[in-house]
Amino acid sequence: GENVEQHPSTLSVQEGDSAVIKCTYSDSASNYFPWYKQELGKRPQLIIDIRSNVGEKKDQRIAVTLNKTAKHFSLHITETQPEDSAVYFCAASIPGTYKYIFGTGTRLKVLA
Amino acid sequence: EAQVTQNPRYLITVTGKKLTVTCSQNMNHEYMSWYRQDPGLGLRQIYYSMNVEVTDKGDVPEGYKVSRKEKRNFPLILESPSPNQTSLYFCASSLSSAEPTDTQYFGPGTRLTVL
């Protein structure tokens, strides 16, 4: 079945540095790739998403890139700040099934 | 205020005692879904519903039931809970089920412990 692998599982960066989280999906028909941020004790919240007809999308310090040939997509956070510290989840949706498959999460720690 | 609500937020129960976790959204969303979150495993989809009276299994449906009798409500039922169902549960909803490319809004979560 569909699988989404996410790496790394933990990531520590110095404040102001960039962070990159990568996900690989198995079903080439997947067409929607959201990223969620979950702060400690809170619910996941969408921070950015990308559809399969787009290669890159940016929103201020956050960007997502998609490589359909290699079946992977990445989250890029520039100029990291302490409030970026959280767990980040990638996901892929499977057209025709209305199912979502999430990655296992990346715990990002931004060191002040 | 537009939101997804879940009740209860915390529940400790014993093996075999039937329980229901309620989920309600006030955004007129068509699509609703249940997930469980376990350390190291991320979020795994249990069941989802494309609209009233239309539900389908996610990746980990065993031991759970759902119903969608009204658009706003999507309860999760554990008829005979077991300790391996101890987890953090999230309900989510999105506007359209036409295709799964809408933002999902998550509820606050229900932490369930089965002894």
Image: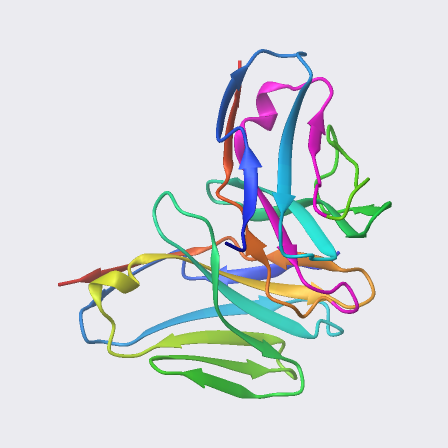
Q: Position of residue B4 (x, y in %)?
A: 56, 48
- Name, please, the residue furthest toward the left: A112
- Left or right: B12 as drawn, with respect to B100: left
- Left or right: B17 as drawn, with respect to B37: right
**Residue placed at 58% from the left, 20% from the top?**
B83
Q: Is residue B71 magenta?
A: no
Q: Depth check: give the residue in front, A21 or B6.
A: B6
Q: Position of residue B94 (x, y in %)?
A: 65, 60
- Name, please, the residue furthest toward the front: B1
Q: Quadrant of residue A55?
A: bottom right
**Residue placed at 56% from the left, 81% from the top?**
A66
Q: Position of residue A19 (x, y in %)?
A: 32, 72
Disc tally is: 0
**Residue placed at 63% from the left, 76% from the top?**
A71
Above or below, B113 relative to A16: above
**Residue placed at 71% from the left, 28% from the top?**
B77
Q: In the rendered structure, which segment of residues is drawn in magenta?
A: B72-99
- Left or right: A13 as drawn, with respect to A47: left
